[in-house]
Image (spheres, rainbow, N blue to C red):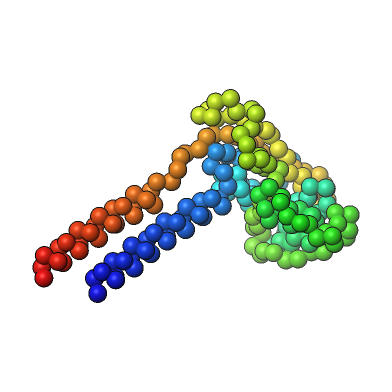
Amino acid sequence: MTRPFLLSLALGLLIAATASIHADAHQGNPNYRSEIRGIAPEVPGLRAEVLNYDSDIVLTNDSDRTIEVEGYEGEPYLRFAPDGTVEANLNSPAYYLNTDRYGDVDVPAAADAGAAPDWKVVAAGGEFSWHDHRSHYMSTSTPPQVTDEGRRTKIFDYEIPLRVDGRPAALEGTLYWVGSPGFPLLPFVLLGLFAAGSLLLVVVVRRRR
């Protein structure tokens, strides 16, 4: 019973380590930091942050205002109501483009920025996160601004247009290059330690027989 158990446990740890690495690959690019500077003009109760390096923007609306996020063609994309309801416009091309980091998707023909919004409830509680191409570098190559990959470097400032009760506003941020922290070795170190421990256990069991 000992050998099958150890084999199953080792296989499970290997799968977990592989899954961890796979998950890291979908959490933004660790070479970058996308940082929110603020919302202009300031709206009390409205706040934003970036998750996973440069991947997702989280907007939380605890104000008594209706907040709209505009898409890439100035169309209504997201709407945050004062009661906490969050809606997405299914006719906004951004709704589909934001499903891929580099916008490499086919946008349905019916998704027309000039069409009347087709709102769909996507969240409650006044908070929603989405991927936005305006807040990260849209290429796999190193930006030309980077002359030393080990030095923090400003890539660009960005603005994501908002409307607050119909009036123009903007979420302002800056994208920085910070360099990669390196290959994630921890899962393999843990796997190696577990394998060594398993081997020691097998030796002990055999000696007791």
Q: Position of residue 173 (x, y in %)?
A: 66, 38
Query: Height in image: 128 above or below 40?
Result: below
Q: Is residue 106 visible?
A: yes
Query: Height in image: 183 above or below 69?
Result: above
Image quarter in which the C terminus is found = bottom left
Q: Is residue 59 visible?
A: no
The picture quadrant where one finds residue 135 is top right
Q: Position of residue 84 (x, y in %)?
A: 68, 62
Residue 77 left/right relative to 153? right
Q: Position of residue 148 (x, y in %)?
A: 55, 26
Q: Residue at x 64, y 62 (%)?
A: 125
Q: Nearer the viewer, residue 83 or 4?
A: 4
Q: Residue furthest bottom?
A: 1
Q: Residue furthest left?
A: 208
Residue 7 left/right relative to 65? left
Residue 115 left/right relative to 98? right
Q: Position of residue 31 (x, y in %)?
A: 55, 38
Q: Residue furthest top?
A: 147
Q: Nearer the viewer, residue 80 or 105?
A: 105
Q: Nearer the viewer, residue 169 or 198?
A: 198
Query: Height in image: 158 above or below 44?
Result: above
The picture quadrant where one finds residue 8 is bottom left
Residue 100 left/right relative to 22? right
Q: Residue at x 84, y 60 (%)?
A: 109
